[in-house]
Amino acid sequence: MAAEDEYEGGRDRLAEKMDELDEQLAEQRAEALRAGLADYDLDEEDAALLAGLSLAEGGVEFLPALPVVAIVGRPNVGKSALVNRILGRREAVVEDTPGVTRDRVTYKAEWNDRRFSLVDTGGWEPDAKGIDRSVAAQAEVAIDLADLVLFVVDAMVGATSTDEHVVKLLRKSGKPVFLVANKIDDTRQEPEAAALWNLGLGEPYPTSAVHGRGVADLLDAVLEKLPEVSAVAKHEIGGPRRVAILGRPNVGKSSLLNKAAGEERVVVNDLAGTTRDPVDEVVELGGKLWRLVDTAGIRRRVHLQQGADFYASLRTSAALEKAEVAVVVLDVSEPLSEQDVRIIDLVLESGRALVLAFNKWDRLSDIDLENQDRRRYLEREIEQDLAHVAWAPRVNISAKTGRHLDKLVPALETALENWDRRIPTGKFNAFISELVAEHPHPLRGGKQPRILFGTQASTRPPTFVLFTTGFLDPGYRRFIQRRLRELYEFEGTPIVINMRVRERRQR
């Protein structure tokens, strides 16, 4: 039997029991459960989490935007190897071929208990003729998005004219820059790094991204200069809510923005991918102000000589970092593609609220039999390919004619409200204990993991932590998630459930 089906569990009385809940009594019970955790081995992070629970239960949390570090440099100087070294895992594609492309460009990194976003710009190879211009343009985008820049130079090759071109830009930006003299594998090669002083960017940091040599010292120095909160991706509180408009090329993102703004603000062209930069616009919709970010379409692959598209995916990543809710625009006149699903997964990974806008709906007129077929297939595609986001509000629109654009506002408001939703600790623990009583976790190897205590650690998205005596099956975790959605209003937001397996203290 598939893990997902294991916990269907038939009808239960969970909803009725939660309706009858005495909230004061539930809080007292939760307090007793929390006190019981004293018998278990907890770490500092657990203690901080539990201490924070008594604070502002109903308050909205605005997590500060993580500072952004961008890595720039010519192709094949070791940027991706440095990304992997900093992350401590193999995430970025590393090959001897310069400019190997990949989809993701922003990663979450951590060093000495400080978290930051890492932007890897090593994703494409500019054509040899325009290398100076292309690398400089790439650096420009990165500088624009970053609080601090790591400029990687191949110390064994020395500074090239391209490197000098980028140096001018870096100096002009006024942002902190660290000169990384890469490929210094041992002390004998260190004089090669010293030669890079003449670039005028201060002290070169001799490193070997492949072997890890010097990277710790570099990161220690970076953290001293890195702000606690990003100045480029800052989350203003109380301003218009920030909406990223995402979708693959030519699905109608710019038309949607223009229609919402009531004027031609973005160039609309039949040529896919004509929009390159996100255009931040404050528009009025449904009597409210919204800040819309129109991002360039994400392509399946960023091919060689397509630097502009690589910047587009960089920008999209940055837009998602700044946004609170994403509207993913899907073209109903074409079959749902792998790309569409990948963009939705990018939103889920970022933890943003989500609304699905099915565009070009006017093409599916009832009169046309061919379109009726397309409509039937579309429903099947949604059922199959978008089952994992069945909780996202769906709006059928026509960006060109403006049809049903007014329905976008309630969908956005619902998604954002639920993204901020908090369930009191008493209520959440009552939900967990009733659920487990009606649908116990199956025995695994003669043992049954117990849930000791549960709490909502944060909002945006709603994130829950379960303290348990053993690992819960993924299928059981999904079951908890599903019942949580069915009982409480979480339409339009992802829900995260984390586990902390803790052992009883030895007497």
Image: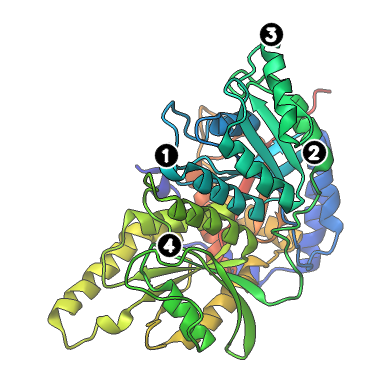
Which numbered disc, 2 or 3, marks the residue closer to the eye?
Answer: 3
Query: Which label's residue is closer to the chain start, 2 or 3?
Result: 3
Crowdedness of circle 4 by 10 Å Cα count: few (<14), some, many (20+)?
many
Query: Which label's residue is closer to the chain start, 4 or 3?
Result: 3
Q: Which residue is mark 2?
A: 223
Which numbered disc, 1 or 3, marks the residue closer to the eye?
Answer: 1
Task: Measure how far apart labels 4 and 3 are at the Cα level.
Answer: 47 Å
Query: Which label's residue is closer to the chain start, 1 or 3?
Result: 1
Task: Measure how far apart labels 2 and 3 are at the Cα level.
Answer: 28 Å
Task: Measure how far apart labels 2 and 1 are at the Cα level.
Answer: 35 Å
Q: Which residue is mark 4?
A: 297
In terms of secondary structure, where does tag 2 sit? helix
In terms of secondary structure, where does tag 4 sit? loop
Taking depth in this image into account, of 88 and 151 the one nearest to the observer is: 151
- Residue placed at 22% from the left, 68% from the top? 377
Crowdedness of circle 2 by 10 Å Cα count: few (<14), some, many (20+)?
some
Q: Which residue is mark 1?
A: 128
Query: Residue farthest to the top?
Result: 188
Give the residue type that dot 4 points to: Gly
Give the residue type that dot 3 points to: Arg
Crowdedness of circle 1 by 10 Å Cα count: few (<14), some, many (20+)?
few
